[in-house]
Image (cartoon, grey):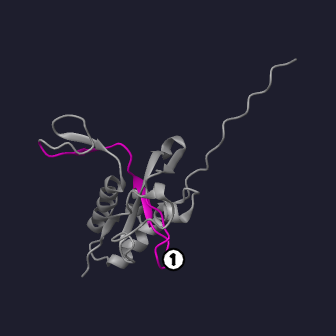
Amino acid sequence: AGVVCCVAAGNSGRAGNSTVGSPGAAREAITVGATVGDPSHGWDEITDFSSRGPTADGRVKPDICLPGFNIIAARGSGTSLGRPVDDHYTSASGTSMATPHAAGAVALLFQAEPGLTPAQVKDRVLRAAQDMGQEPNWQGRGRENVLALARGQTAEPLPKKVPAPTPEPPPP
């Protein structure tokens, strides 16, 4: 029907692999896992709760990952989802907090190129993901790079974590 569906992978990652269920297992959906970290400071990881593939028929899911840990979002008056920050905002974690980032990225892409088909959008989203060096059934193609997506670029992998140097032992 020409609609791009961005869906949450689910929050059953602690239960192990093959925890992405419906609707995240849908072939055409852009299934979103959750990350925690700051790639600009050299680290980003899949959250332990983010559901993992493969799907029941062996496909890699999620497709991409985006921030989903301690996300500040608007909340309805009188509600208590997550940890309320004030009367208007809450802090929550989950793949449902990562998925709006993907939907927003897709909206930006459609604004730039309104004639794209859902298959073209998904292909571009996958190409703009940065490999995090983690298991594909945890990260999909990796963390989405929204700037690369908007520019129609293929994203470079995220830099590998560099372990801290081992200090020299003191002289005897």
**Which residue is drawn at the image coordinates 29% and 57% (left, top)?**
100
Residue 115 visible in the displayed image: yes
Which percent across, then down, holds residue 168? 78, 27
Rendered location of residue 81, percent (x, y): 23, 45
Would you say 96 lies left or right of 12 here? left
Q: Nearer the viewer, residue 147 or 17?
A: 17
136 with respect to 115 (left or right): right
Residue 144 in view in this figure: no
Q: Residue at x 33, y 71 (%)?
A: 23
Please, what is the dominant secondary structure of the magenta stretch?
Answer: loop
Q: Nearer the viewer, residue 150 or 96?
A: 96
Q: Is residue 167 above or below residue 47?
A: above
Number of numbered discs present?
1
Q: Is residue 79 above or below residue 142?
A: above
Residue drawn at 49 percent across, 65 percent down: 140
Is 128 within the magenta? no
Q: Residues within 10 Å of mark 1 (few under 14, many from 20)?
A: few
From the top left corner, tell me how far across and down residue 4 is, in percent: 29, 72
Amino acid of disc 1: Gly
Q: Of all residues shown, which one is farthest toward the left?
A: 77
Q: Residue placed at 51% from the left, 64% from the top?
A: 17
Q: Quadrant of residue 25?
A: bottom left
Identify the image quadrant of residue 116: bottom left
The residue beneath circle 1 is 58
The quadrant the N terminus occupies is bottom left
Whether 155 is drawn above or below 84: the answer is below
User: Does 52 lie within the magenta span?
Assistant: yes
Part of the protein shown in magenta: 51-77
Nearer-the-camera pick, 81 or 130: 81
Where residue 28 sits: x, y (%)? 37, 77
